[in-house]
Image (cartoon, helix red, strand yellow):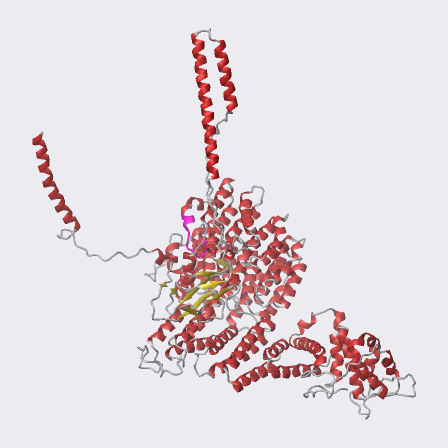
Amino acid sequence: MATTLAMPLPTPTSKRPRLPLATASGLLALLSEPDPTLVQHALTKLLSVVDTLWHEIAEALPDLEAIAEGGTLGGGEDEDDDDNDNDIMVDAAPAEVVVFDQRTRQTAAALASRVFFHLEEPRQALRLALESGNEYFNVVKPPKEDEAYVERLVNAAIGEYVKKRRGEFDAAGIAAAGAAGEDKEEEEEELDMDKLQSVVHLMFERCYQDGQYGHALGVAFESMEKDKVAEILQRLLLATTTDGTNEAESNVVSILKYALQSAQTLITSKNFRVEALTLVASTLEQLVQAKNGDYSSNTTKEAACTLVLCRQILGDAVAVGKIITLLIDANGKKGEEGGGDDTSLLGLQLCFDIVDSGDEAFVAKVAECCSLEQVVVVDGSDLGSEETAADDNNNTPTRSKSTCDYYTNVQRVLTGGFTSELSLSFLYKNSNNDKLIMSNLKKALEERSMSRNSVLHNCAVTAHGYLTAGTTNDSFLRDNLDWMKKASNWAKFSATASMGVIHASHTTEAMTLLEPYLPPSAPEDDPNAEHPTVSATGGYAEGGSLYALGLIHGSHAGSSTTKRLEASTFLRNHLRNSHANEVISHGAALGVGLTSFGSADLDVVGELKELLYTDSAVAGEAASYAMGMVLVGSGAGNASSSAGEELAELVAELRNYSRETHHEKIIRGIAMCLALVNFGQEENADATIEEMRGDRDPIIRYGAMYGLALAYCGTGSNKAIRILLHTAVSDVSDDVRMAAVIGLAFVLHKTPERVPDLVRLLLESFNPHVRYASCMAVGIAMAGTGDSDSVALLEPMLTDMTDYVRQGALLGTSMIYMQQSDTCNNRKIKSFREKLANLVSDKHQTTLTKMGAILSTGLLDAGGRNCVISLGSRNGFTKMTSAAGLVLWLQHWHWYPLMHMFSLAVTPTCTIGLNKDFKYPKKFEVQCNSKPSAFAYPKKLEEKKEEIKKRVETVALSTTAKSKARLARKKAKEAESGEDSTESAMDVDKKEEEGESKKEEEKTEGMDIDGEGAKEEKPKKKREPEPTSFRISNPSRITKAQAEVCAFDLDQRYRPIRHAEKPYGVIMLTDSTPDEEEDLGAVKTPAAEEEADPPEPFQWTPPGHPDHPDTKVDEKDSGKGEGDEKPAADSTAAN
């Protein structure tokens, strides 16, 4: 047997000459000679010509493999075999046994390996190359002529090694990799794991020598070798310490950023990903700590940002809070030593990025760690001579006033609701909502008495909510109250709840806006007062208002924690006292779930559980959804969950209750609750999902599909995709198949271009539920991209024979066209808008198709054309609020009031630059390297003016007039001797004919004049070419696609703190000339924007005072009266 490749491989002593031979038949004949020396000579010569004559040598592959595998050492040393039964005889004579030494066997293995390489069978080539030894298979320094061969086999070795390592880590992954026959073949030709490992480890050494640490990390991540990851990172850090240059440090940070991204994409196991990212974070911490608090260099700042991102992925809020604290405290260290304001601004920028991820529980923990009472300053001696703010009686280090102001702003961002205020202010002031869309929609519904249809009327109100989501513009509803009053029962509930979508994040005025609709409650001044009795009937407006209150506070992850807690307390009070009315309980439960989103509060869950156990179908369903929102992402009930035992017991109770109750609505609510609980849990949720998948109840299996989609949301897991696709074509329930197909969009939302290819065949399925789900999956994945291929894929579905498939195609297409200009897809978007308008007014279309057209109208221009469906945050996180909101919105298939959950799924695409005082400089601009029309707002509709029909005068030809005149003259001559009366009549006729002829001449002249005027028209202006770039003001809408072609202008006064990032979202700015005057704008709420300006200063005087205006007027009037009497007397005397 050949020795293993564990030791470093020496370089070959000589290069193999390439002999120009025409044929290898002579050399092949020598292989059958009994003399081992001749065989060795033939093998050596064949090895030199194998690259050109491999097709001839391929015929002798069985002999070569026999020589490579069956010889024994000349010294007679026995290795693995106990006998010599495997020795191969070259000659058939039984009396003469030929054995080959190790070198001959290695040469034969090398020759056979190269033949298999040329036959494009790398696995067989690798198997023999491992037996050929280091002389023929040098991994570290291959000869130049063998580079392609070695490179290909090393790749094959890495692939096989990764496959085996993953098989050891997750046996289920390899079991489903191929067919049974292939598995048996692989078992028969098993590769030596030790030799494979040696090759891979030698490849690591080669990467160290070449400085390719990123490649080595990629292989270590894929093969899930924790020890190798630690070794590579240690070598990387050691190389940086040895070099010590800024360029080396920058290279290390870039490699660690690459490692962070690779760990998220290459590592399929969450448990190993956590271990790997912990090592990466430890390396980054060592790099940052080596600077001793000096954050002046861009490399150190980038390392700190990467460290925050890594710790956020790990869920380590304490570590994140510590880093932000260090960055803020660097403000006290003036000059280059600490970084000054730039470092503190970087801390604020990181706070905005953390809030953008949508994990409210994580944000709350970071805020707690960043409070002035919790943070600790490492060195407080360099704070400068500014005014300090601290308590001298305790040991807390002092901080400057400016540093304390930064801490105040940190809390304002994390828990004060400032990000919510930013979005609200932007959507309010920059709304591009087209009022005619709703006017035309209302008119189309009224023309054919379709407004009597409760479903279409409800959809129209919901579409209005989508159009004005977050803009606080409810003028259409106020102007059409009579039309709104047509809603009754649950439609009334939904119409009232739409106010929450319109005023999303407007927390300061929430109670004032909803006060007319809210149910009566006990006075706050009297704690002993009893809650008013709730009627068992009605309450649709009251329940809808409670739901709206939850939407206002829960639609945005960055809303004020204090305001949300107040709303949650108010809603819980109504929840406890409204069990008698299932409508009010329904609205209160949904509102509580939204205001306590992600909090995992046991008290809230306990109150919701009490409502669930009332066994009311409507109220129980809402309570289940609400519990899912409260426990979202907690993983309660899983074996490796960090949630408490009480939550685990609660989840077990929910599973049991789902088997006991007979209400399908409650079962569906519990199934979706379990799905939300497992958000982001990946393989930790496998046991729960498998149990749900195997349930006999299709509703539980329906929840399992959404649970799988949320557990692996954004991971691109092949295992999850395989299960979803298998279920989509095999389950007996249409709803389960539908949920499985839609789940693909969630799993692949970070690589959305894969979804259309996956569902292409499913769009041709005979099952209409699968076709509907395929349309929705493509729409969710490609939302806001305007992708022409995806639109073409859905286009045939717009004319499908099933109405709800057409509805899904309309919704999916409208999602793709969100925030697209009129030039999108060769201006086909304009025809799609016209199609939506025509479908609503078409009497031949079914209600479900019209419903899809109405909702699509709202989706297309959501949020005043400033919002888009987005499951990912700026830093690549999956937004918990958006994912949960979109899943709940999809449940409108079963329950229409859940249409309003769309408010959680949309994200404003605003870009706003802020200074350290959270005001936006109006002179800050972003350069967009694209034509303005590519990302412009769609053109608004123009109101059609009614044309007044005018009566067209009959045209008389001049020849007709002349002939009449001639006829009249002839008759006149013939009747000269006639009576006077006859003559007079003829004279009148003649005059009339002459008058008509004159009019005809005047008309002809007029026509000639008009013709001359037409020739003198002004020449048309030449259309100027559209510019190829333009500047975007601050703040403004910048979509994700537009951000790719935008760049910062670093020559202007205001520059971003992280200029390497794309101009998207909130951007903290530095001022290069702080001494100059600034033109700033303040972020205001809509209520503050509408306030009138204060009056100019004036002095008030009481009535009766000599300086009072009324007193002066009276005196003037009395004086005028006395003077007026004298002229009157004089005039009397004169008379």
Q: Quadrant of residue 236?
A: bottom right
Q: Which residues are magenta?
A: 468-478
Q: Is residue 120 magenta?
A: no
Q: Nearer the viewer, residue 697 or 297?
A: 297
Q: Nearer the viewer, residue 669 or 934?
A: 934
Reply above or below: 73 against 610: below
Q: Is residue 477 magenta?
A: yes
Q: Quadrant of residue 181?
A: bottom right
Residue 513 visible somewhere in the drawing: yes
Residue 968 at x, y percent in the picture: 49, 15
Reply above or below: 521 against 453: below
Main SS class of the magenta portion in the image: loop
Residue 56 at x, y percent in the picture: 83, 75
Residue 830 at x, y percent in the picture: 54, 49
Q: Quadrant of the N terminus?
A: bottom right
Residue 953 at x, y percent in the picture: 48, 27
Residue 580 visible somewhere in the drawing: no
Q: Horizontally, is 399 left or right of 486 in the view?
A: left
Reply above or below: 350 against 765: below
Reply above or below: 875 against 491: below
Q: Horizontally, is 124 left or right of 1113 in the view?
A: right
Residue shown at 61% from the left, 73% from the top: 266
